[in-house]
């Protein structure tokens, strides 16, 4: 006869499986990245290895099993390595920075028609340059009519659905020809901004999304395409001698390949000066939102992952990073940052 396993033993076994899965991931992630669909998903949600750590910790305290304490300690140390700096005060760096510039990226949701909420969000965020993804005609018209005095420089390309893009600025901007191959969610925008008597480059981008997590072939296909997109974008950025800012929706987390392609060469404003995990997606259960729901009731919590980013070239000093004012309708919340140019 099969021996019945007691409830505490079941939890101990599950805890050991948790530790085993985590340490396998810790090895295969840097070796293989997002090569397979299951690894892409594991990388995308790997932050939850650390967020559920209190459960095996409580079990270790109750059972006093040494193996559980060892496992908890190992995961905790890895968590400090990956995310510890996000929960500590940022060190003050004396780099001789010049005047400050505030920027923001905001995926407004292509089906969002609450123009009043979006305008209120923009005004309360109090930044100087804003890049929009999923900009639709209703939102664009409201921006043109209500914010022209505050943001006299606007290059808006609204579209139905999710492919609209736009940038507004308090400083003169000039659109440049810019074409990156492949399928982007809206054509990336390249702009030259005149700020403090010099030219800076701003890129507004929206990378291809993974699609349904249940369509494994599509997950692999979109991963390959996104990585190719980001390599091409990085190649363009590396050729620039002027200061560069990338604003947009990367559609993956900081443990996925696309992020790892950019991060060795560009500063992630949130990683540098943000506090907390900085999760920006998913937000409201609205028409067209990617947050799963049934009969209007959400099937997942808010703010599961960070998909929205501000990347800066090495000429910039990151002064701060925080959330912008969320409009309560979009499935993303905006990220803003204050940056300044380092003195040579």
Image (cartoon, rainbow, N blue to C red):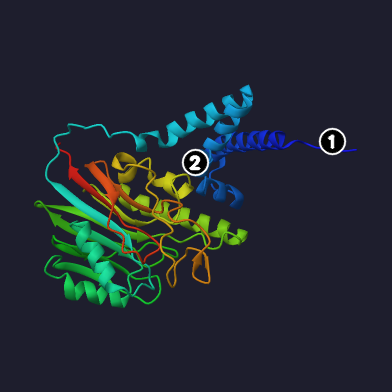
19 horizontally vs 5: left or right: left
Residue on which disc 1 sits: 3
Q: Secondary structure at mark 1?
A: loop
Q: Residue furthest top?
A: 66
258 horizontally vs 150: left or right: right
In this view of the protein, can residue 239 be seen by the observer? no
Image height of 153 relative to 160, above or below? above
Residue on which disc 2 sits: 51
Quadrant for the C terminus, please. Answer: top left
Q: Are marks 1 and 2 in contact (CB under 8 Å)?
A: no
Coordinates of residue 163 in the picture (x, y in percent) = 38, 70
Foreground pick, 227 / 10: 10
19 horizontally vs 152: left or right: right
Foreground pick, 124 / 167: 124
Coordinates of residue 8 in the picture (x, y in percent) = 69, 34
Coordinates of residue 125 in the picture (x, y in percent) = 22, 57
Image mark for residue 258: none
Coordinates of residue 87 in the picture (x, y in percent) = 36, 36
> Residue 99, located in which quarter of the rendered image?
top left
Which residue does the image show at 63% across and 35% down from the upper left?
15
Q: Secondary structure at mark 2?
A: helix
Query: How many residues crowd mark 2 within 10 Å: few (<14), some (14–19), many (20+)?
Result: few
Query: How many residues crowd mark 1 within 10 Å: few (<14), some (14–19), many (20+)?
Result: few
């Amino acid at each position: 006869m099969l021996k019945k396993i007691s409830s505490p033993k079941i939890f101990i076994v599950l805890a050991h499986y948790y530790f085993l899965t985590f340490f396998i991931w810790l090895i295969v992630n840097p070796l293989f990245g997002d090569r397979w669909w299951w690894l892409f998903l594991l990388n995308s949600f790997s932050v939850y290895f650390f967020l559920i750590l209190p459960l095996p910790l409580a079990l270790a305290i109750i059972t006093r099993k040494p193996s559980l304490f060892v496992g908890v300690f190992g995961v905790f140390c890895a968590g400090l390595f990956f995310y510890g700096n996000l929960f500590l005060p940022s060190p003050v760096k004396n780099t001789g920075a010049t005047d400050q510039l505030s920027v923001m990226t905001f995926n407004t949701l292509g089906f969002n028609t609450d123009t009043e909420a979006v305008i209120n969000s923009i005004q309360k965020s109090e930044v100087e340059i804003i890049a929009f993804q999923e900009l639709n005609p209703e939102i664009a018209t409201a921006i043109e009519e209500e914010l022209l005095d505050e943001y006299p420089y606007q290059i808006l390309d609204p579209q139905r659905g999710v492919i609209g893009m736009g940038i507004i600025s308090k400083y003169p901007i000039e659109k440049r020809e810019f074409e990156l191959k492949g399928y982007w969610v809206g054509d990336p925008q390249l702009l030259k901004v005149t700020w403090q008597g010099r030219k800076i480059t701003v890129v507004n981008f929206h990378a291809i999304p993974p699609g349904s997590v249940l369509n494994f072939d599509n997950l692999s296909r979109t991963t390959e395409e996104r990585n190719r997109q980001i390599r091409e974008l990085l190649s363009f950025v590396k050729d620039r001698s002027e200061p560069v800012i990338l604003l947009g929706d990367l559609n993956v987390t900081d443990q996925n390949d696309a992020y790892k392609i950019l991060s060795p060469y560009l500063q992630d404003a949130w990683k540098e000066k943000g506090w907390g995990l900085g999760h920006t997606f998913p937000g409201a259960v609205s028409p067209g939102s990617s947050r799963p729901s049934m009969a209007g009731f959400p099937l997942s919590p808010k703010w599961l992952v960070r998909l929205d980013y501000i990347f800066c070239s090495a000429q910039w000093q990151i002064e701060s990073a925080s959330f912008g004012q969320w409009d309560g309708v979009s499935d993303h919340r905006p990220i803003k940052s204050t940056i300044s140019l380092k003195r040579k």
